[in-house]
Image (cartoon, helix red, strand yellow):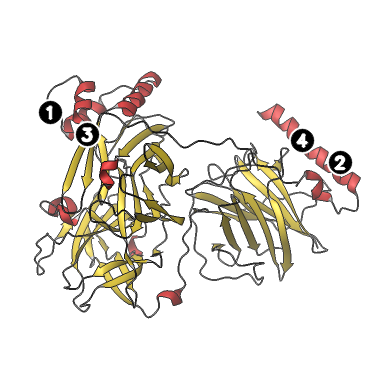
Amino acid sequence: MQTWIILCLYISSTAIEICTGIASPLQPFTTYDHSIQLEANIAELWWTVNNAAQEITFELHMKTIGWIALGISPAGGMKGADIAVGWVDSSGKAHIQDRFAFDKQKPVMDNTTQDWFLLKGQEQNGWTAIQFKRYFDSCDPMDVPIKLGTNILIFAYGLDDIDPCQAKVDITYHDDRRGSRILPLRSYADQPADAMLAGLDFVDFRFDNHAVPSADTTYYCKVFKSPSRFLTKRHAIAHEVLIDSRNTNLLHHLDLFECSSKDVLDDANLPDGVCDDILTGMRMCSSNVATSWAIGADLTTVYPKEAGYAVTGVNNNKYFMIKIHYDNPRLTSNLRDSSGIRFYLGNELRQYDLSYLVFGTLSSPASLAIPPNTEQFIVDSYCPPEATRNFPASGINVVSALPHTHLQGISVWTKLIRNNTAVQYLFNAEAFDFNHQFANRLSTPIKIYPGDAFATRCIYSTRNKDDMTLGGKRTIDEMCSHTFSYYPMVESLTACMTAIDQTAWQTIMKTSLPIDNIKLEQWLRNLTWTPKSVAQWQEFYNEAQRFIMYDRGSYMDFNVLPTIPKYEDLQVEPCNRKEIQHSNDQLCHESNDSVACQNTLFLFAFIFFVFKIIFL
């Protein structure tokens, strides 16, 4: 019996599970950098990213002797999906096709170029395996680029074979034999094997069955002291977010902060409660980020081998504060939570201390005021060279990136600016998804030197809203932050955040009176929006004077920028991918009836042409 495989790669926004057990009886053709289980005992995927060649090599295993699918979509469904079709025939020969889905219907042949390149294939014990590769960007208008940030994988399979040389024997409907997962294909950090962390000492900072208020949004904080059983400095080599199984849908994000040594805390009465109620006078317990986790991300993070996070100190005087954002839109009462974080301690100190930097905007109406019914609204922030003046001359090494917005965010990036020229992206989450906020591991560390500056951009879409979206803590409010882990630790900067300066607001509001967030929000809520006023608002955001806050760890520093500085930007190279010789005639290169096969290809092309005339 012939076995067919459809390999459809879709980029969009659904969850992805980590491969915790391989069910496929087939051994992968080679060793890969990453692997996941798309569906338990059904579908498994391996892949390796080659940044130099700008391509990814995939290997898909699925439990079927019919066709199978794995693919890339711009929005998470069939519409606009870039689809590769492959199979292993009765002689054991593997084949592949390139298809495109105009809507929720059978995908048609891509009549431009063949951009899914077959490498190997096999079938055994009811499973089929196909190895293939794809460029990040094929330059084909009927393909979907594999972007940095989150990518949505959609997979499906059928029970029957297809035959490309017989038009009547084609892809059959998959019914419910389908699924979708989301992950950052180009910057994925695999979950560690259990053996890697087994037997290590660990430190837990977690809540103790505390009551969660029945409010739509709650930020709950609790301060912990590093355990007394560790009398010397110990480095964590990984951390794991511990989510109470009762509350998997309640936690939106978790932040852990290291309190400044200047904070005076009573060990017998450490702060514990709603953050707004306990943080007055405790700013130093909410500035130095020790780690962050957001909804949809993997639970375990392994640090680079060169660096560890110092969880304990020589005199055991380290304090940490957990801040958890609970999202409870149904206002459910009587909720209890014991979530937290676990640090796994290495047996030896590593060469460097790991730390974190945060760029973006403050979370207030003065920072973010996004008009409704807008396809794309851009908010820029800038961290000038002054921020990094005290960095070591040898520089620091950025190793991971965590972009963060709320529901309306669709893209987040930060560029490294050196000598008024954009050198590269620190990270470009072109495809950002609120429900899957991964800590993206950089393929190679990026150096930052004294005098470097940073430009951060968050892009929002509010097509689904009829009122303004303002900066704030609630899930329905917005944020714009980009958190980077790095080594070695510097104490001169933990965050560099901006807001529209008060003088700019006074000018546009035509007042000389002081403006607080309450007055500003009232004024903003009364605005009427038209396409013209949205364009004017974007211009205001592009040119407005900025207020900058530098968090120096032990103190705060401030500055004002008359406008976002102009810099020589990165050059956008036109897509001119050199075509590899994989043409449609390869689909039937070993067919016994080449004439009939070519006729079938012409039929596909004709059907596609007619489809465009009727439906487009």
Report the label total: 4
Q: Nearer the viewer, mark 1 or mark 3?
A: 3
Q: Name the residue under label 1.
A: 514
Q: Which of marks 4 and 3 is in front?
A: 3
Q: Name the residue under label 4.
A: 607
Q: Which of 334 and 427 is in front in this view?
A: 427
Q: Earlier in the sequence, mark 4 or mark 3?
A: 3
Q: How crowded is mark 4: few (under 14 residues within 10 Å), some or many (20 or more)?
A: few
Q: What is the secondary structure assignment of the residue under circle 4?
A: helix
Image coords of residue 114 (percent x, y): 72, 45
- Please, what is the three-letter code of the amino acid marked with disc 2? Asn
Q: Mark 3 points at which residue?
A: 560
Q: What is the secondary structure assignment of the residue under circle 3?
A: strand
Image coords of residue 183 (percent x, y): 49, 54
Q: Nearer the viewer, mark 1 or mark 4?
A: 1
The answer to whether the residue labelled 4 contacts the one labelled 3, judged by CB atoms less than 8 Å apart, is no
